[in-house]
Every structure is written in structure tokens, then in C-alpha cells.
Image (spheres, rainbow, N blue to C red):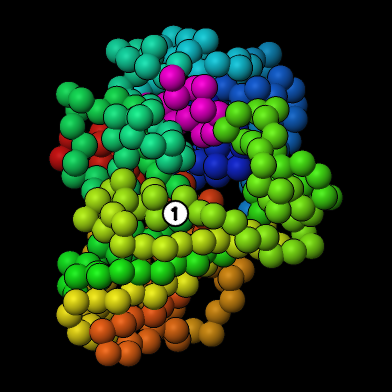
Amino acid sequence: MIKIGINGLGRIGRVLLRQILNSKIFKVVAINDINPDLNNIAYLIKYDSTYGKLKSSISINKDQLTINKKKIKFSNKTRIDEVNWKKFNVDYIIDSSGVKKNLVLSKKLIKKVKNIIVTNSPGPQYVDKTLIYGVNDNNFDRSKDFLISSSICDATALAPILKVVNNLFEIKKGFVTTLHPWLGYQNLLDGPSKSYAVPGQIIDNYALGRASPNSLIPKNTSAIKATYEVLPVLRNKFIANSFRIPTSIVSSADVVLELKKKPTQKKLINKIINLKPKIISLSREPLVSSDFTRTEFSSFLDLRFLNILDNHIKFTLWYDNEWGYSSKVLDLIKKINSGI
């Protein structure tokens, strides 16, 4: 079993835990979170407004959670390096805290665990490498890469199909608009816009401080910048923006590409069919966003909106920005651990 420690039990941390509970490959042995109330932690694991009630027994004994007879040690430290991960026999830490300070502190844990996987895209100045499963996971170097970014949900959804299209038809330029559900640091009512990466900091993106259930909120997106980290051949070829939308789960991306070679649907679809399992799926039904909840694919290509005009192609992607993304984080760790 691959022994996992989770640092930060927010949305992604809890989804990862749920997925690992059903795994025959992974085992969560330790959790660290700034929430000191272990009863509240157990409650949030058990009851989930998006993915439903967990059909597992949960009990608490001092600093330990037991879920279906699986024992998980719990600690309440503000810094990732203050946790004795080695004592808990952790192989890999997944840092889903989103806190930028933990990136610097993670370096202190070299030789105490095999790798730390960061579930965001902080940039090359903070991590040894950014890897997306199904795109550049073959680039892992055990001798050099300790702190690894598993990128973000948008890049995890976009990069696989952009790689396919570029290999087949060569992208000249592209335009991307993502539609992303609200996130925990947004406001229910109008107020200051809060930073997630630096807790307590107020940022000057005033629109992002508006009431999240009331509006589509336009914002810049890091989706393409994160994609460049794994597909540098596309650097500076894209313009992108995003909208935060008043839903709780499932993102979408609207993509327009100008290509050097004339594209065909047949070539694109045939290539997608032959990708690794659960990277890109083809959707032919008249579905809506909620139909893609709890799906493990990186993204779904909606064939209703796959259109070609001369050397241009336009398509729509759907992806569960929590469940689908988390499943690719685990696929990445599995690949790293295999050494292949």
C-alpha cells in the first residue's frame, strides 16, 4: 500500500480522502489541518453537500480517526514542517492546504518522505516540477524532483486535449474561457476579496469580493499559465479569461483554436479514443453540468459543440473540478511510485 499524508482537509483534501478510502493501492495514514476540532473534521468527512453522505463508520479516539477500521492519525499544526510525517510512516504528502508559506517549508521535509505533491500551480520558482497525468508525467526525475505541483483542475482538463490537437494539427493561437464554480474563499455577501494562498490578506480584485451566489464574476485565469508549465511549446499562443459561476461543482471550458493544418473530427476522435484510460471522454448526450459530477476523467469533450471552420476548431469541455482533478493527482502519484 502507498501510504499518504494529507496536509489541509479542505474540499480537495476531503475528496482525496474519499477516493483513497475505496482504493486498494493507497492508504491515508495521517491528516494535518488547522481546524483543531476533530469532531468537526469527522462531521465534514461524513456529510458532504456535493458528494453526499459517506457510507462508512467514523469514530474518534484522542488524536485518531478510525474510518471503516482504517486508523488515521490527526494533527493540528499551522506549518507543514511541524508535523512528524516520518513517525506516521508517510510515503507521500499531498499538500492541499493552498497556503503559499507551506511551499517554502516543504523543503525541510526532504529525506523524510518520498515526495510532496502540491495541489495548485504556484510557479516554477516554488516547485521542482509541474506534472499533469496524461501530459508530461514521463518527465519525473527521482534524483531531482521532490516538491511537485500537480497543477490545477483547469490545466488538468485543458492540457491533455491541447497536446493532442497540437500534435495532430499544430496550434497557431488559441482563446479559452473557463466557467468555474465558486470557491471557499469567495463571499456569500458583498465584501473585501480575500486571498486563499495568504490567509488574512485582502487582494485588490474587487469583483471577486462580490456575492458569489448572485452573479457571474469575470476574472483572469491561471489556466493557461499553468498549462504552459507542462506544454511549453504553446507558450504565448493563448488569451484566456474566466467566470466564477453560481454553482458548487463542475467546470466548463470554451476553446477556439487556429491551426496550421486543416483539422478533421475523425483524426481527433480516433486519437482521443487511444489515450490512457480516464483522460478524455467523449460525450454525445444532451447533458448539463451536474451530470458530470463525481466523474474521474480529466475532461469530457462535448461532441455537440465540436465545430470546424477552415483551419479553426471550436469545442467545449466539461470536468468535475474536484473529483476529476483529485483522481488525476492519485494517478500521478501511482505513476511516480511505479518508477516507470
Extreme-right residue of the structure: 189
Extreme-bottom residue of the structure: 309
Residue 186 point in image, percent of width and height: 71, 46
Q: Which residue is mark 1?
A: 223
From the viewer's perspective, is 210 left or right of 20?
A: right
Residue at 79 percent across and 62 percent down: it is 214
Q: Is residue 207 magenta?
A: no
Q: Is residue 100 magenta?
A: yes
Residue 268 point in image, percent of width and height: 24, 78
From the viewer's perspective, is 240 left or right of 194?
A: left
- Above or below, 142 relative to 307: above
Which quadrant of the rendered structure holds the C terminus? top left
**Whether residue 249 is visible:** no
Q: Residues within 10 Å of mark 1 (few under 14, many from 20)?
A: many
User: Amino acid type of disc 1?
Assistant: Ala
Residue 24 point in image, percent of width and height: 38, 41
Residue at 33 percent across and 74 percent down: it is 257
- The foreground one among 170 and 39 is 170
- The foreground one among 336 and 108 is 108
Which quadrant of the rendered structure holds the N terminus? top left
Q: Bounds of the magenta span?
A: 92-104
- The foreground one among 17 and 170 is 170
- Above or below, 203 relative to 325: above
- Above or below, 128 relative to 294: above
Tell how many labels: 1
Residue at 70 percent across and 27 percent down: it is 200
Residue 12 point in image, percent of width and height: 55, 42
- The foreground one among 225 and 188 is 225
